[in-house]
């Protein structure tokens, strides 16, 4: 027998549970403006410090500081604010409609709105995103018609996805938004394949893929990084680290040992770790990675460091597994408040205009919901049942034709 | 005896096994502190300790691979896959590894794991929270596939599965967690309270794998079902006035072929019901077996009632879900021929 201590199985435990004081002392944060910005064509080997820092532009006073400041026009900042607010207000409204039994399911992106919005605006029309279910901001930033969202959520007769998909698992090809699915992670590799196809054809579009930090544990994540690296695919691969995967804190996905951005190092890809609640930082990192991709320097992994301020979905109650007031203690603030504060600091916005914008968006959303309700909510209205058999194959085979007949539709 | 719903009965089975056998451990997505998205592991971490019931990364392939490694070492892991729809990333581990480890190692290694996973429709869960994948496991030799239909069986079958030395896929009909759903979604829903199978012993007992249950005796036609469809078929039979015998398979591998043959020999007619889509479904195997073994006793063609051959569509939940009307129509066809 050796005189070593006996082996022990380590199970990660979060710093705070319900009833404890929220604690974020363990987080690795940087000051706004403190992280260097290398040339986007620099060799990966010269950037291995970046995955352990946190790229931030907005400081505590709402000023844009440091080398990553993208110097956006006030108009663009206001567009971003508008889309982020629209996302938040729409989420709130839909959550309430779920409580009233008007749909089966909903998920919010509360606290993560800067990500989808900034990246949607920073990238071009020919670029394709491979979103997660928390990327409504992408569609809001591109003015996707609200009524389509509402009809999809109600699975009613006007649902653009014809009643086939769960609420919020949208597909909007013309808006650069790839079809969502309920299984997490499985489209991360599609983003790489799409980018490889664009390179193969000699086109100029790139792809951006998303995965939650929890889902980086799936093989899909590692496979996508391998292919992106091997073929220098023009793709931006994003990990939205909102600290939680349903009830599991990020330690269950490996965050005790390293950062998610640092996973890039082993694949020979640059890894950027970015304040995901900072609209300007998200924008800046995205255009850096886009420039790298567009100039044939290959893929970048971006960790967007944020916080899931709401429950996982309408089926979840986060007070069962984390302190009820934890969201208020998130050290990187709220993305909407921070962008608003920045615009106000620039003298380009004020509380009155903000209140007017909220009122206007609330009214627009209310009108879209009314229009959708007039078609019907879940169970009151649905597409023709014949639709159930369409789209399995391009043309239905005998089985589907017989079954359709058996059902009498 | 205590009154339990299926969630409580499963929880009780796990509780009993954690207490009885230090080699039993549970892991899966959100099963630890939180107790699982369907609450099946509620309280088990607190009662039995952090290393006995803990959260896993979102990696179904990783969960099953590590469970196999633990099983090979001598533990009896009971991993949970949060929804059966998400078991597919683990399919290679189940098919190429768990199912064959004993065979290919000449018995040196084996994988005594029990993979619990909620499955099935009727909850407006759309394409990826509603599927019934039992046929893709039944096709793989070396895996056992168990599907309870009530709290009493759920507990006894789960304990038997954990004690079984072979890998078991344990599919839980999530639509039955809270009550015996008969497909009448527009009527008052029943709970397990007051149902005979909601009376569950608190301690250890088993329901053997491979033994079907006769839910209802009858002389006119044999109805074979499992999972949620047991209750839908029972409701349809009771409303039809046909004296049907209803067999709940409880496990599809091992399959109680004797119970099936004995019943069909008596009735001469057979209706097979499952939620999963029809083509290549487990009903095809059942139909072939009945035909091979009971051909000369059959008075009418074997009927299969199954999900349509489409993905599971959200808006069309009740058009897709096999309901009492389709079962009644099949019963009538079987009786008329
Ligand atoms: C393959 C697969 N496994 C499990 C699930 C169940 N599930 C849905 S969301 C989720 C958590 C995902 O967490 P994360 O990737 O961190 O994204 P977040 O929800 O935090 O945005 C899980 C486990 C699923 N949808 N797909």
Image: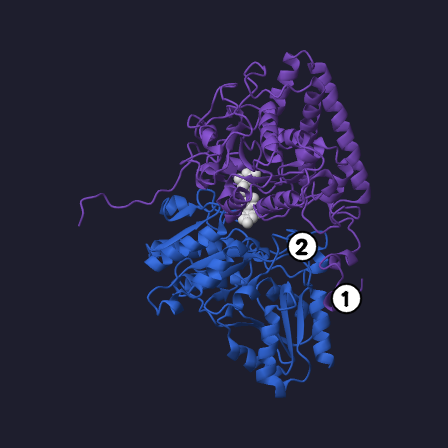
Q: Which mark is residue A401?
A: 1
In this rendered view, identify the residue nearer to me: A137 or B115.
A137
Which residue carries the number 2 mark? B188
From this view, report whether residue A401 is shown above or below residue B59: below
Q: Quadrant of residue B109?
A: bottom left
Give residue A348's position: percent from left, percent from top: 69, 14
Q: Determine crowd level at label 1: few under 14, some 14-19, many 20+ residues with C-alpha closer than 10 A.
A: some
Specify the farthest residue to the bottom. B296
| Colour of chain B in the image | blue
SS state under label 2 = loop
Marks 2 and 1 share the same chain? no
In this rendered view, identify the residue nearer to me: B71 or B206.
B71
Give residue A402's position: percent from left, percent from top: 76, 68
Residue B250 appears in the rendering:
no
Give residue A154's position: percent from left, percent from top: 73, 44
The C terminus of chain A sits in image quarter: bottom right
Parent chain of label 1: A
Q: Which chain is purple?
A: A
Q: Quadrant of residue B294?
A: bottom right
Residue at 67 percent across and 42 percent down: it is A202
In this rendered view, identify the residue nearer to me: A40 or A136.
A40
Q: Are marks 2 and 1 in contact (CB under 8 Å)?
A: no
Marks 2, 1: nearer the viewer: 1
SS state under label 1 = helix
Distance between mark 2 and mark 1 Cα atoms: 35 Å
């Amino acid at each position: 027998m050796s005189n070593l201590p006996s082996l022990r199985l380590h199970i990660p435990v979060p710093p705070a549970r319900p009833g404890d004081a929220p604690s974020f002392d363990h987080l690795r944060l940087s000051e706004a403006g403190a992280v260097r910005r290398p040339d986007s064509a620099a060799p990966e080997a010269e950037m291995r410090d970046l995955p352990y820092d946190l790229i931030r532009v907005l400081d505590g006073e709402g000023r844009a500081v440091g080398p990553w400041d993208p110097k956006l026009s006030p108009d663009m900042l206001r567009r971003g604010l508008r889309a982020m607010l629209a996302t938040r207000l729409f989420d709130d409204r839909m959550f309430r409609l779920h409580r009233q039994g008007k749909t089966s399911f909903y998920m919010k992106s509360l606290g993560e709105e800067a990500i989808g919005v900034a990246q949607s605006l920073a990238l071009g029309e020919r670029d394709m995103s491979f979103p997660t279910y928390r990327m409504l901001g992408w569609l809001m930033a591109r003015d996707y018609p609200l009524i389509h969202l509402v009809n999809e959520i109600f699975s009613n007769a006007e649902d653009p996805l014809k009643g086939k998909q769960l609420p919020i698992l949208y597909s909007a090809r013309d808006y650069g938004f790839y079809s969502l699915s309920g299984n997490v992670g499985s489209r991360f590799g599609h983003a790489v394949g799409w980018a490889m196809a664009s390179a193969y054809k000699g086109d100029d579009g790139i792809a951006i893929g998303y995965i939650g930090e929890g889902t980086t544990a799936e093989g899909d994540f590692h496979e996508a990084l391998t292919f992106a690296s091997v073929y220098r695919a023009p793709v931006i691969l994003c990990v939205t680290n909102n600290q939680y995967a349903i009830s599991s804190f990020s330690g269950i996905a490996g965050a005790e040992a390293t950062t998610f951005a640092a996973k890039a190092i082993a694949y020979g890809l640059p890894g950027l770790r970015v304040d995901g609640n900072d609209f300007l930082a998200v924008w800046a990192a995205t255009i850096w990675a886009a420039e790298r991709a567009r100039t044939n320097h290959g893929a970048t992994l971006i960790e967007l460091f944020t916080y899931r301020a709401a429950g996982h979905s309408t089926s979840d109650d986060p007070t069962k597994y984390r302190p009820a007031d934890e969201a208020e203690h998130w050290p990187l603030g709220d993305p909407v408040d921070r962008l608003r504060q920045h615009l106000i600091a620039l003298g380009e916005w004020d509380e009155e205009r903000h209140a007017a914008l909220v009122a206007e968006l609330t009214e627009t959303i209310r009108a879209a919901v009314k229009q959708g309700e007039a078609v019907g909510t879940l169970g009151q209205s649905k597409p023709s049942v014949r639709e159930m058999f369409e789209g399995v194959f391009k043309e239905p085979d005998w089985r589907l034709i017989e079954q359709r007949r058996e059902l009498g539709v | 005896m205590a009154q339990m719903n299926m969630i409580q009965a499963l929880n009780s089975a796990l509780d009993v096994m954690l207490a009885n056998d230090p080699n039993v451990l549970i892991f899966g997505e959100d099963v630890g502190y939180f107790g699982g998205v369907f609450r099946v592991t509620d309280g088990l971490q607190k009662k039995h300790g952090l290393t006995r019931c803990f959260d896993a990364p979102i990696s179904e392939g990783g969960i099953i691979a590590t469970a196999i490694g633990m099983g090979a070492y001598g533990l009896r892991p009971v991993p949970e896959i949060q929804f059966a729809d998400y078991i597919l990333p683990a399919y290679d581990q189940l098919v190429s590894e768990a199912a064959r480890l004993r065979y290919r190692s000449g018995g040196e290694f084996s994988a005594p794991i029990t993979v619990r996973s909620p499955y099935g429709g009727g909850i407006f869960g759309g394409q990826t929270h509603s599927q019934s994948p039992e046929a893709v496991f039944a096709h793989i030799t070396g895996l056992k596939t168990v599907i309870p239909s009530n709290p009493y069986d759920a507990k006894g079958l789960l304990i038997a599965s954990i004690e079984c030395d072979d890998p078991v896929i344990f599919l839980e009909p999530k639509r039955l967690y809270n009550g015996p759903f008969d497909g009448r979604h527009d009527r008052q829903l029943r709970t397990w309270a007051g149902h005979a199978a909601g009376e569950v012993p608190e301690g250890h007992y088993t329901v053997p794998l491979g033994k079907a249950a006769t839910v209802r005796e009858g002389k006119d036609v044999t109805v074979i079902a499992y999972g949620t469809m047991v209750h839908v078929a029972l409701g349809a039979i009771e409303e039809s006035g046909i004296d049907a015998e209803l067999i709940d398979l409880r496990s599809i591998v091992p399959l109680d072929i004797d119970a099936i043959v004995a019943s069909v020999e008596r009735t001469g007619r057979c209706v097979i019901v499952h939620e999963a889509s029809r083509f290549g479904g487990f009903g095809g195997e059942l139909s072939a077996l009945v035909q091979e073994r009971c051909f000369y006793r059959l008075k009418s063609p074997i009927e299969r009632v199954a999900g349509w051959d489409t993905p599971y569509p959200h808006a069309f939940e009740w058009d897709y879900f096999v309901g009492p009307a389709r079962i009644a129509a099949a019963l009538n066809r079987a009786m008329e021929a």
